[in-house]
Image (spheres, helix red, strand yellow):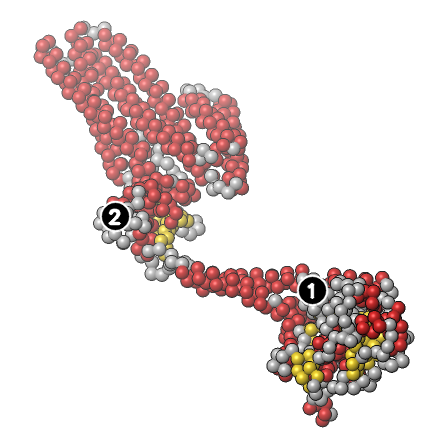
């Protein structure tokens, strides 16, 4: 008994009648149970089948990535570290005021990070510093300073390049420290940019800290100069009056009145000085607030921002009212409590809208403006407190003016000479004391300004980096390989999932069609045994090298044809299969080769066999066996009788070949004629088996006519070429005319390609158990 063809276990051919015997293993879908091992093998097979896709995708992605990684210039980073202590810069400012608030901007570390990231003046200041250094630098020393032509960059262009290379971050959690990092293609240049930017920030904090003190010092200097000139003039006027009037001194009453006037006038003048200092500080705060509002104008455009701004303005008004209430001799506590409650409500609105504004900004891809709003709110609060103090000094001046007017009225009642002398002495001494007070405050302001070093300090300068931080070439190459590999696997899986071609025996079983046999590809056999030739001459017959059952009976493909013969013999146990039609869906699927080899193995089994070439359009059987096409089938049908023009093959026993015959213009009429039916009926007395090679069904209707006159019809599909919908169409057409389709043959199946790592076992299995093998002879 012929052995079965050698396939992996799940690909053994089955017959419709044998399904019940195998259903316990395969189930209705004729597939093994789906478990992890089978699924894993399926995925591995998919990967192996698509290995060239995977390799191509990997190379397409990995090669450019590797080239980019190798050719990309090294990027160096260097960082300068600063401490930020914004709360330590106010003490000296407070010392030169009358106990009022300091007007130097105070901000937490988040505010400073906001300034470092968004203040464009920092980059401009750093650019100015670098351009100053460019005068002593060599032409190629710092590329960041120059254009590709070697010319120095403009201030704005250099500032833009600096901003693009700088990154700011807090240097650790819960610490008031900032890290300024610069990146460049030149190591020394990275350190240069980082240090220049850090120095620009330190200078900014120093200028910011000195802003209010400088405003006060400027005002005091102008007042001191003016008072000094006034004092000199009054001293000269007093001396001249005393010489002219022979006045020596004042009496006791006049002296007391002059002393009272001097005290009140001096206090009033000092209050005016304080008002001037406060006015200068408020002007500086106004400029800071205006600049910050200009920077945050985009964030202030939302409804939440406007609501927050209105709440801030209302708080300012309420705090002014509260300060006014508290200055009364008998303040109304109920009114004070009501104002404080209103302030608390407005503060709640500010807190709520601040979070809302931050969420809106982040949702639109912007930065969190909370820090900027907090800074803006602090500045406005300082301005409000300064305005409250300003109102207090103005009220005090009003009261002092009343006291001065009363003392002046009393002084007017004295004798004329005493009054004039008292007035002149009073003016001189008042101006003298005011000048002394201004000189003292001016000295304090100068000391405060010179001592104000800012609230940021560089604790670690950026050094020249010893190694680059980018590109990370090994990582980029590995990621490129992984990305390409992943893309290739996705392409392989997608190709397998969307591929409509029938590749494996399971593809046919899954569509519900019986699988008669799987014929392996003989390309390797032809290349090895026949040097790739299409034909070989044996005993005067020029035979096609794909007739493996005749030329290589021990080959694996020959075993597969013997398995196909067995499947055909047992396909219809209720009838004798004597007339077989072999067809396919489309040309090129190997139906003629399958029909010829099937006829040979039938003859080798001792059954008298006739192979008829029924493909009258593109006949091939005569070429396979090296005979002429005519006379043949059409010649006999046209002659209406006569002896059958079959050719007996001396190279094989029990097989005759009937070629297609002469070319005719109407093949369908010949194949559907009564003469052909009578001829086929007459062959039953001569041959045990008649095999008809029919045309493809999708190319002609001829096989439909032949299938109605046959005991069995075999449909040949080619692995990797025939589409599933083509097979469905063929089976539907044959079923519509009642043809006895016994199953499907999967031809030219490449087991190595489709089953990957499992093909080796199947290949050895076929070699060890084929006819003529050494093992079979010794068994």
Q: Is residue 308 left or right of residue 738?
A: left
For the point 44% across and 35% down, the residue is 296
Circle 2 — which element?
Answer: helix
Taking the view exactly as shown, the residue that stands out farthest to the right is: 574
For the point 36% across and 46% down, the residue is 161
* Residue 584 horizontal/vertical position (percent): 75, 68
Circle 1 — which element?
Answer: loop
Q: Nearer the viewer, mark 2 or mark 1?
A: 1
Name the quarter where the C terminus is drawn: bottom right
For the point 22% across and 23% down, the residue is 434
- In three-dimensional space, the C-alpha distance between marks 2 and 1, rounded to whole angstroms, equals 70 Å
Name the quarter where the N terminus is drawn: bottom right
* Residue 672 horizontal/vertical position (percent): 85, 66
* Residue 477 horizontal/vertical position (percent): 47, 63
Which residue is tagged 2? 134
Q: Is residue 69 left or right of residue 491?
A: left
* Residue 448 horizontal/vertical position (percent): 27, 36
For the point 45% across and 23% down, the residue is 321
Count of marks overlaid on the render: 2
Q: Closest to the observer: 468 or 532?
A: 532
Which residue is tagged 1? 501
Examine the image and state in which quarter residue 201 appears. Answer: top left
Examine the image and state in which quarter residue 286 appears. Answer: top left
- For label 2, the crowd category at 10 Å Cα-Cα, with few meaning under 14, some 14 to 19 and many 20 or more, is some
| Residue 774 seen in the figure | yes
Q: Closest to the observer: 405 or 667?
A: 667
Residue 32 vs 136, above or below: the answer is: below
Q: Closest to the observer: 314 or 556?
A: 556
| Residue 744 seen in the figure | no
């Amino acid at each position: 008994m012929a052995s079965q063809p050698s396939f992996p276990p799940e690909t053994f051919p089955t017959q419709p009648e044998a399904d019940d015997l195998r259903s316990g293993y395969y189930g209705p879908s004729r597939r093994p149970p789906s478990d992890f091992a089978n699924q894993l093998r399926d995925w591995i097979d998919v990967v192996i089948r698509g290995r060239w896709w995977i390799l191509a995708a990997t190379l397409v992605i990995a090669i450019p990535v590797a080239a980019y990684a190798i050719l990309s210039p090294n990027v160096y980073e260097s960082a300068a570290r600063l401490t930020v202590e914004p709360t330590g810069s106010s003490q000296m400012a407070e010392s030169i005021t009358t106990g009022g608030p300091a007007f130097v901007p105070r901000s937490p570390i988040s505010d400073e990070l906001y300034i470092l990231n968004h203040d464009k003046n920092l980059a401009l200041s750093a650019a100015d510093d670098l351009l100053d250094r460019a005068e002593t630098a060599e032409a190629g020393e710092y590329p960041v300073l120059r254009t590709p032509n070697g010319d120095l960059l403009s201030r704005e262009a250099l500032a833009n390049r600096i901003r693009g290379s700088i990154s700011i971050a807090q240097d650790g959690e819960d610490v008031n420290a900032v890290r300024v990092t610069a990146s460049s293609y030149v190591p020394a240049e990275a350190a240069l940019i980082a240090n220049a930017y850090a120095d620009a920030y330190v200078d900014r904090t120093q200028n910011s800290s000195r802003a209010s003190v400088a405003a006060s010092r400027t005002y005091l200097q102008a007042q001191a100069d003016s008072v000094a000139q006034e004092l000199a003039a009054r001293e000269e006027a007093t001396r001249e009056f005393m010489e002219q009037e022979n006045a020596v001194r004042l009496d006791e009453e006049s002296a007391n009145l002059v002393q009272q006037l001097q005290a009140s006038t001096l206090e009033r003048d000092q209050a005016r000085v304080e008002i001037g200092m406060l006015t200068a500080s408020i002007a500086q705060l106004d400029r800071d607030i205006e600049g910050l509002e200009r920077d945050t104008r985009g964030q202030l455009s939302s409804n939440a921002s406007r609501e927050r701004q209105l709440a801030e303005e209302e708080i300012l008004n309420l705090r002014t009212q509260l300060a006014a209430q508290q200055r009364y001799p008998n303040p109304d506590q109920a009114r004070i409590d009501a104002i404080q409650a209103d302030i608390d409500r407005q503060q709640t609105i500010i807190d709520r809208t601040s979070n809302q504004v931050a969420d809106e900004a982040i949702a639109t891809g912007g930065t969190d403006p909370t820090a900027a709003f907090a800074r803006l709110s602090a500045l406005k609060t300082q301005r409000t407190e300064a305005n409250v103090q300003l109102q207090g000094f103005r009220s005090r001046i009003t009261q002092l003016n009343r006291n001065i007017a009363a003392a002046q009225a009393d002084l007017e009642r004295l004798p004329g000479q005493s009054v004039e002398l008292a007035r002149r002495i009073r003016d001189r001494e008042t101006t003298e004391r005011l000048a002394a007070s201004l000189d003292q405050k001016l000295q304090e302001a100068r000391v405060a300004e010179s001592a104000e070093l800012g609230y940021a300090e560089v604790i670690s300068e950026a050094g020249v980096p010893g190694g680059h931080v980018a590109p990370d070439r090994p990582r980029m190459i590995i990621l490129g390989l992984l990305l390409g590999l992943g893309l290739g696997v996705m392409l392989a899986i997608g190709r397998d999932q969307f591929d409509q071609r029938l590749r494996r025996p399971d593809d046919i079983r899954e569509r519900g069609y019986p699988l008669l046999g799987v014929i392996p590809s003989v390309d390797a056999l032809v290349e090895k045994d026949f040097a790739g030739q299409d034909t070989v001459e044996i005993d005067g017959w020029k035979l096609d090298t794909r007739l493996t059952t005749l030329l290589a009976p021990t080959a694996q493909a020959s075993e597969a044809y013997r398995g196909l013969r067995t499947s055909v013999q047992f396909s219809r146990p209720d009838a004798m299969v004597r007339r077989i039609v072999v067809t396919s869906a489309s040309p090129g699927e190997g139906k003629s080769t399958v029909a010829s080899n099937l006829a040979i193995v039938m003859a080798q089994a001792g059954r008298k066999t006739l192979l008829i070439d029924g493909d009258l359009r593109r006949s091939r059987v005569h070429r396979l066996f090296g005979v002429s096409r005519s006379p043949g089938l059409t010649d006999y049908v046209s002659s209406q009788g006569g002896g059958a023009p079959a050719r007996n093959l001396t190279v094989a026993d029990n097989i005759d070949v009937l070629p297609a015959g002469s070319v005719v213009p109407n093949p369908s009429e010949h194949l559907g004629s009564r003469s052909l039916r009578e001829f086929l009926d007459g062959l039953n007395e001569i041959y045990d088996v008649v095999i008809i090679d029919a045309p493809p069904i999708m190319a002609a209707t001829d096989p439909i006519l032949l299938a109605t006159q046959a005991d069995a019809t075999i449909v040949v599909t080619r692995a990797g070429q025939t589409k599933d919908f083509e097979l469905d169409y063929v089976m539907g057409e044959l079923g519509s005319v009642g043809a006895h389709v016994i199953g499907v043959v999967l031809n030219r199946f490449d087991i190595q390609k489709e089953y990957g790592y499992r093909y080796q076992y199947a290949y050895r299995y076929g070699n060890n158990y084929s006819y003529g093998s050494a093992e079979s002879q010794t068994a």
